[in-house]
Image: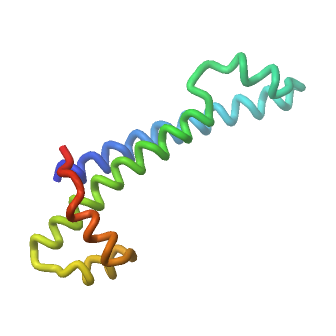
Amino acid sequence: MTALEEVCATARQMIANAEQILERAAYIREQRAAGASYREIVPAEPGPLIVELISDSLSQLADAGSRWRRAEARALHGEGLTMDMIARLFGVTRQRVSSLLKGPLDR
């Protein structure tokens, strides 16, 4: 359940990041319409920049998703599903499932 809660928290953070991205994009559009260059806009823009928000979101989602995949694979295996069955459910190889099951225990 911890991994699932982390996925939910990450999704909420991504929604907040997406809202910031939309606000920043609107600001950039306004500045561009007023004749400002990117060279003028970007250095003056308060952080985090859109590119930072995107990178942060992707990194957080990848981390949370990895922990969730591992936790879910372990739960399914613990409830009797074979590695082949889990592999079909996840759309990965049996070897990948084996790696998920053998990997480090997450927090």
Q: Residue at x 56, y 26 (%)?
A: 48
For residue 11, above or below residue 42 = below
Q: Is 95 placed left or right of 105 in the picture?
A: right
Quadrant of residue 86 in the image?
A: bottom left
Q: Position of residue 69 (x, y in %)?
A: 29, 61
Residue at the far top: name it: 44
Nearer the observer, 75 or 41: 75
Q: Position of residue 22 (x, y in %)?
A: 61, 39
Nearer the observer, 54 or 66: 66
Q: Residue at x 27, y 63 (%)?
A: 100
The colour scheme used here is rainbow
Q: Position of residue 56 (x, y in %)?
A: 49, 38
For residue 59, above or below residue 94 = above
Q: Is 89 placed left or right of 14 in the picture?
A: left
Q: Residue at x 85, y 31 (%)?
A: 33
Q: Position of residue 6 (x, y in %)?
A: 27, 46
Q: Residue at x 25, y 60 (%)?
A: 70
Nearer the observer, 81 or 34: 81
Q: Is 27 placed left or right of 20 in the picture?
A: right
For residue 3, above or below residue 18 = below
Quadrant of residue 88 in the image?
A: bottom left
Quadrant into which the C terminus falls: top left
Count how many numbered circles sit on residues in the image: 0
For residue 64, above or below residue 71 = above
Residue at the far left: name it: 79
Quadrant of residue 47 in the image?
A: top right
Q: Is 95 placed left or right of 16 in the picture?
A: left
